[in-house]
Amino acid sequence: MRYISTRGGCPPKTFEEVVLTGLAPDGGLFVPSAIPHFSREEIASWRSLSYQQLAFKVMRPYVGDCIPEDDLQTLIDRAYANFRHAAIAPLVQTGDNEWILELFHGPTLAFKDFALQFLGHLLDYSLQKRDQKVVIMGATSGDTGSAAIEGCRSCSNVEMFILHPHQRVSDVQRRQMTTVLADNIHNIALQGNFDDCQNMVKACFSDQSFLPDNRQLVAVNSINWARIMAQIVYYFWAALQLGGPQRAVSFAVPTGNFGDIFAGYLAAKMGLPIEQLVIATNQNDILHRCISANDHRTLPLQQSLAPSMDIMISSNFERLLFHAYRRDGDQIAALMAAAKQGHMRLSDAALAEVRQLFASHRCDDASMLAMIDGVYSDSGYLMDPHTAIGLDAARSCRANAITPMITLATAHPAKFPDAVRRAGYPEDPELPAHMADLFERAERFNVLDNDRAAVEHFMSQRIGAGS
Ligand SMILES: *Cc1c(COP(=O)(O)O)cnc(C)c1O
């Protein structure tokens, strides 16, 4: 399997090459040159596999001959060994033919562990084999940082720098990052907001001359192909539990950067019968406006109670448009230039293509709180704010009552105690046992000015000390 850029201007690369970098050199995102396809008979034959065995079947064609089969299965087994539910991704029923897929049983209580636990083991394996060291740099508004740190804390060939906006992430989110005291993990609290963090990371990726000679930066946000790939698995998993592939299923996905739901799109293209994919947004609703009214204007970002979805431009939407525009890299480059200026419009043909599978819905804070409260009152099931937005979208957009509708639960409610209390829950939801002492652990982080020279100086010093 080879990988090409969505903007068409870059020679094909191997799986390992795309995992060990960030954007393609032409500014696009890497996508597989062809999407593998499985017959219904083959998918049906996977029904009794464990999650880890299924992950192997789904990911194998994307990895190709980069990793021997036994090694790939070992990496997968290690990635899911720290999940605290035997089913890895259990389904819970919340209504008539209505299900929640719990993706928060990993080490940091958010779905990002599915990809980042795997990516950590994959990087460790590939870098040792290549005798190479890399520097991971990423910005986080909360969940990505902790999942990436947990995934890579034991990687001996990785130095990792995670920037979060100083005093603007929740205490639980900060402590999940800053209490990991491994020597290769460096938390930077930047004097600025999340956009400042992200711009700093982009600037450093665009000119890496501050790094020691033989080092390169690797991205761990959802532009990294390995993250998308690992997320395809649980769509197959959930469908197989509920009678797929003989029976189609639908999914509703709390969406920010469009990585999670794009994995669902790939599952459909790979042969899994999916009737609907529902994009759920909060009040930052650019994707909902785009799908429902071809209105992709950028508006000022609003802070919501579902902060992991507070995103204006969703990077991975480009990967979907690449397919909707029949893999025409020039058209994608032009569209993305328009999006950057704040006014992208899709062609009628592309929009029609997208609408064949996708629906969308916007859920503001008030409706989200009402959803948490309503479901808890009805059934005693407590959801986090992101999941509640997903369920609201599922109920609004559902095409029929016969097809099982599965909402992805992207985080554990204990990660967002403020929102859960505002919904009327009488106390802070309990953290799982492995995190119960989070507020007693020692923290380590450095507060830096929003200044590129200061950040680069800090990084080059730490890299020098570590090697
Ligand atoms: C990251 C995140 C999302 C958004 O996922 P994308 O892949 O960026 O669309 C939704 N919910 C939670 C809890 C998250 O951490």
Image (cartoon, grey):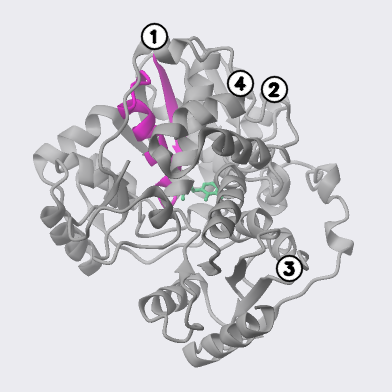
Instruction: Please identify, in this view, whether the residue under mark 4 or under mark 1 is nearer the observer.
Output: 1
Amino acid identity at mark 4: Thr
Q: Which mark is residue 94?
A: 4
Q: How far apart are marks 2 and 3 (CA)?
A: 36 Å
Residue at point 38% right, 55% down?
18
Quarter occupied by the N terminus: top left
Asked if the residue at tag 1 contacts the one at tag 3, i.e. Cβ–Cβ closer than 8 Å, the answer is no
Query: Of the residues shown, which amino acid type is indicated by label 3?
Result: Thr
* Disc 1 secondary structure class: helix
What residue is drawn where x is 42% and y is 46%? 259
Please tell me the numbered disc located at residue 108: none
Can you give x and y, in whole percent of width and height, for residue 169 in the image? 63, 66
Q: Mark 2 points at which residue?
A: 379
Query: Secondary structure under badge 4?
Result: strand
Residue 241 in which image quadrant: top right
Q: In which quarter of the image is residue 41?
A: top left
Q: Could you say where residue 378 lies in the image, as x and y percent from the top left?
A: 67, 23
Q: Can residue 255 be seen in this view?
A: no
Foreground pick, 107 / 55:
55
Q: How crowded is mark 4: few (under 14 residues within 10 Å), some or many (20 or more)?
A: some
Q: Which amino acid does label 1 sit on?
A: Glu
Task: Give the Cα distance between marks 4 and 3.
Answer: 36 Å
**Residue 41 got which mark?**
1
Is 264 magenta? The answer is yes
Q: Is mark 3 on a helix, strand or loop?
A: helix
How many other residues sit within 10 Å of disc 2, few (<14), some (14-19) or many (≥20)? few
- Asked if ligand 1 lies within 8 A of label 4, the reply is no
Q: Which label's residue is closer to the chain start, 3 or 1?
A: 1
Residue 458 found in image quarter: bottom right
State how far apart marks 2 and 1 are (Cα): 37 Å
Q: Disc 2 or disc 3, which is closer to the eye?
A: 3
